[in-house]
Image: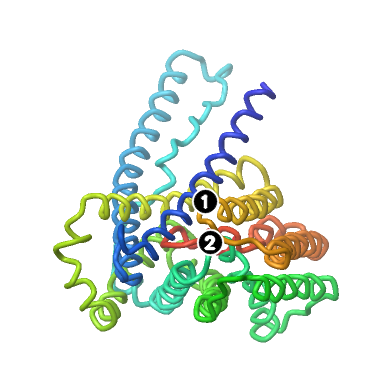
Amino acid sequence: MPSDNVLYVSSVVATYWFVSISMVYLNKILMSNEGVSINAPLFVTWYQCIITALICYVAGLVGKRQRRIDAATTEYTRVAQTEEVSASTQPKATEAKPSFFAQFPKAEYTAAIARRVFPLSVVFVGMITFNNLCLKWVQVSFYNVARSLTIVFNVFFTRVLLGAHTSGKTSACLGVVILGFLLGSHGELDFSMRGTIAGVCSSLFVSLNSIFTKKILPVVDDNHWKLTYYNNVNASVLFIPLILYFEGDVIMASMDAQLSSGAFWSAMTIAGFFGFSIGIVTVLQIKATSPLSHNISGTAKAAAQSMMAFYIWGNKATLLGVLGIFTVLGGSLLYTLVKMNENASAAPSESASSQSIGTNSDAETGPRSVETAKV
C-alpha cells in the first residue's frame, strides 16, 4: 500500500534525524560539561570505540545465528515444495527476505588484516579526535560551519592524487561553501580559533578517510561492518598511549567523582550506541529513499540541528552567523547535485556508488560505520 510505504519512509527519516541530532547533542555534553563528564575527550572517544567494537562483535554472533536460521528456513521451504508439487508443475521456491541481523558478519580479528587496515585506522583516529575536539570547543550552532570544508578537501585530493578534472560548476559550489565558512566564522560571537582549526583538521581527515576506505575495503571483502570492527579495535589500542600522556592526570583526579557515577557511564554508553546506530540509520535512509534524498535530508537535518542549538544551548545568533550556516549547507547541497549529474553523465553504471558521497552532514562524532563518514 502507498500509505504504508510513506509511513515507513517517514519513520526511517525521523529515526535518522533523532539519532543524528541526539548523538551530536549528547557528545557535546560529554565533551564540554565537566559537571557531567570529565575534561578528557580522548578518553571519551576511546570508550565509544570500545562500545562500537563490542556491538559489532555481538551483532556478528547474532548475525551468524540468524543466517543459519534463514538457510534452514529456505531449505525447509524448498524440500516441502519438492515433496508436495510434481517436478513438471513445481514453482520456483521463493527466497525469504534476509533478516536485519543477517547483514552483520562474524567479528574476527586477525593480525595480518589488522596491519593492512592500520593506516586507515590512524586516519580514523585523527578524524574522530579532531571531530570531538571541534565539538568541545565551538558552539553547537557553529559546529556544521567549522566542519564544512570536507568537500573542498575531497576535490583537492581527487585532483592532486588522482589527477581528476574539476569542472567549473564544481569549483563554483566550492566557492559557495568557502564563502559560507568565512561568513559563519566572522559572524560567530563566541568564535574559537582552536575549535575552528580542529574543525578544519576534522574535515581534512574525513576526506582522507574516504580515500583510504576505498583503498582498504577490498582487504575486508568490501564489507563495511568488518572494516568498522577492525577500525574500532585498532583505534582502541592507538588511543591508549595518547590518553596516558595527555589525560592521565585528569582521569586519576576523577576516579572518585565522575568515574564513579552511574549517570556518566550511562551517558557514555548511550553515546557509543548512537555512534554505531548512525551507520545503520544512514544506510536505511538511503535504501528507503535515494542517495539524493538522503543528502537533502542530511542538509535539512543539519540546518534544524543548528537552529535548535540557538534555543537549546543558548547560542547567540547573528545575521552573518545564520547566513553562513545556510550558505554552507546550500553550497554542499549544490555540490551534491552537480556531482550526481556529472557522475550520471560520465558513467551511469557507477553513479549509484558515487552518489552516496555528498555533504558532510553525517560525519558527526564518535566511531561508527566508516561508510557514514563519507556521506
Residue 67 visible in the snapshot: yes
Q: Quadrant of the N terminus?
A: top right
Residue drawn at x 46%, y 36% as measured from the top left: 98
Residue at the top extreme? 84
From the top left corner, tell me how far across and down residue 24 is, in percent.
Answer: 48, 56
Neighbours of disc 2 within 10 Å: few (<14), some (14-19), many (20+) = many
Q: Secondary structure at mark 1?
A: helix
Q: Secondary structure at mark 2?
A: helix
Residue at the bottom extreme? 160
The residue type indicated by label 1 comes to Ile
Residue 234 visible in the snapshot: no
Residue at the right extreme? 168
Residue drawn at x 63%, y 69% as measured from the top left: 148
> Which residue in the structure is indicated by mark 1?
312
Do the residues under discs 2 and 1 have CB atoms within 8 angstroms?
Answer: yes
Q: Quadrant of the C terminus?
A: bottom right
- In the image, residue 197 sits, relative to residue 3, either above or below, namely below
> Which residue in the structure is indicated by mark 2?
140
